Image (spheres, rainbow, N blue to C red):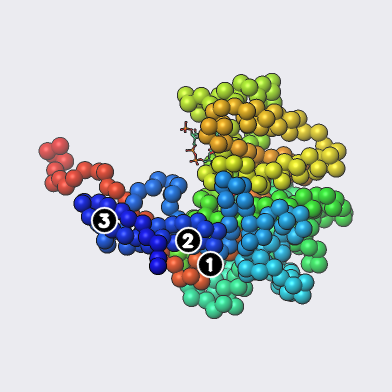
Amino acid sequence: MTETASISIDGKTHEFPVITGTENEKAIDISKLRDQTGAITLDPGFKNTGATQSAVTFLDGEKGILRYRGYPIEQLAEQSTFLEVAYLLIYGELPSATVLEEFRKKIDRHTLIHEDMKKFFDGFPSKSHPMGQLSCLVGALSAFYPESLDPNPTEEEEDLTIVKLLAKMPTIVSWIYKKSLGHPVMYPRNGLNFVHNFLNMTFGQITEDVEIEPEVVSAMHKLLILHADHEQNCSTSTVRIVGSSNANLYASISAGISALWGPLHGGANQAVIEMLENIKNDGGDSAKWLAKAKDKNDPFRLMGFGHRVYKNFDPRAKIIKKACDDVLERLGINDPVLDIAKELEEAALKDQYFVDRKLYPNVDFYSGIIYRALGFPTDMFTVLFALGRLPGWIAQWKEMRANKEPIGRPRQVYTGSVIRDYVSIEKR
Ligand code: SDX
């Protein structure tokens, strides 16, 4: 017997089926609501609206739970590698050692980008934001791989497009960074693991071999794993809705990169460091800035705090905060903004305004401090978020396609003028 929910409108009561997920989340299936009642629902920001049924990631905002394909991120962050997590998210299962090695070799074969793409890099002003470059360059990949435009690819053709994008993203990201410095780009070195190869292209020098500390490689794996997916967030929903029009993978991911750029979303990791630097330069009075964050007449918000879903702690923030201490200690770095961040967190968690609104540090609050310690400039932080989130975006896009979901097209409530006749300009 299917559980139902009743909605009464215009004196009539209608029954709608209730769907229960594998973690006992409930949803009212309103796909027939307008046909049955003539009414639609209204939910700005989709705070109460499910767009899909997905098997990729489960999170529980009240309990601070985050799992990729059922595996807790605490275990994956400690024991897995980014490429293995990418495989898990995209194909649904942890690979055997043989399958993972085959996957790595497939990736290795596609890490180069077409030499003509260098013209795109040369076209950007030297100080242009890396996220704008990344969105453009990923979208431009479709120009070099026109077969990716086929809206009905075979499974092998779709998989090749997925592998190409996964393989080329680290090369594109590292080249954006090298170009920003006016340095010569580094080419991928097959045989290095995915993350080490990325770090070598980013921090390596063509004039001499540069040793990438194992601590840096390990911290990067952890950060990328923690950013790899997060169910139906703003940028993932963007990837899904763009992909739902049968737009190719590169165009869909390019759109997701643009959505992630916003400071309320992935752009927050850059905004957090800029905020902490401002507070430091302003004398480090965290109480003053906390008061500004609470003042409705002040546009200042405590960046890296609050979350649409996590109304308890963000499990990623806890892991990143600990990694912050470990990495900075191992690298012998003392970053004063880390102390300011900890002071802000401690004060906010005791402040009624933040407690009442269930505002806790999110994934972006501490991540920038580690990125900076690893040697990345602030404007590269959100690009690193995108590099981490890529497998999640791909997994969600692939699932949306495999489930043959309809093109996304929300309805609206019209609040404009009722009908009126055109008046010629002479009579106005
Ligand atoms: C990410 O969705 C995801 O999963 C995203 C993400 C992912 O992995 O994909 O987790 C990554 O985007 C993390 C969030 C990064 N953004 C920031 O750190 C920016 C600062 N935080 C916010 O602006 C805000 O908290 C959001 C955008 C994250 C959530 O916004 P909501 O859910 O729309 O909540 P809201 O803006 O309606 O806030 C509710 C109340 C409001 O006060 P009242 O009107 O009730 O009095 O809380 C206040 C807000 O003013 N509030 C804050 C605040 N965040 C919310 N007040 C001060 N500082 C803040 N940071």
Mark in the foreground, 1 or 2: 2
CB atoms of marks 1 and 2 within 8 Å = no
**Secondary structure type for disc 1:** helix
Q: Nearer the viewer, residue 215 or 245?
A: 215
**Coordinates of residue 398 in the picture (x, y in percent):** 55, 67
Between circles 1 and 3, the one closer to the viewer is 3
Asked whether, in this view, residue 245 is left or right of residue 72, the answer is: left
Q: Position of residue 319 (x, y in %)?
A: 71, 46
Of the image marks 1 and 2, the number of the one nearer the N terminus = 2
> What separation in Å lies between label 1 and label 3 (alpha carbons)?
35 Å
Q: Inspect the image, locate mark 3, and give the three-letter code of the amino acid beneath it.
A: Thr
Residue 399 - label: 1
**Which image quadrant is residue 185 in?**
bottom right
Name the residue carrying label 2.
Answer: 20
The secondary element bearing badge 3 is classed as strand
Question: Hey, which quadrant is residue 129 in on the image?
Answer: top right
Mark 3 sits on what residue?
A: 13
Q: In the picture shown, does residue 413 fall above or below 27?
A: above
- How many residues crowd around disc 3 within 10 Å: few (fewer than 14), some, or many (20 or more)? few
Query: Could you give the CA–CA distance between mark 1 and mark 2, rounded to whole angstroms?
Result: 19 Å
Residue 352, image x and y in percent?
56, 27
Which label belongs to residue 273?
none
Please report the residue visible at 40 percent of the width from the left and 62 percent of the height from the top: 3
Q: What secondary structure is found at the residue carrying circle 2?
A: strand
Residue at 50%, 29% (x, y): give it. 299
Marks 3 and 2, the one that precedes in the sequence: 3
Apparent side of residue 370 relative to residue 270 in the rendered image (left or right): right
Queried on whether the Cβ of the residue with tag 1 lies below 8 angstroms from ligand 1, the answer reads no
Place of residue 210 in the rendered image (x, y in percent of width and height, measured from the top left): 86, 52
Left or right: where does residue 218 sit relative to residue 42? right
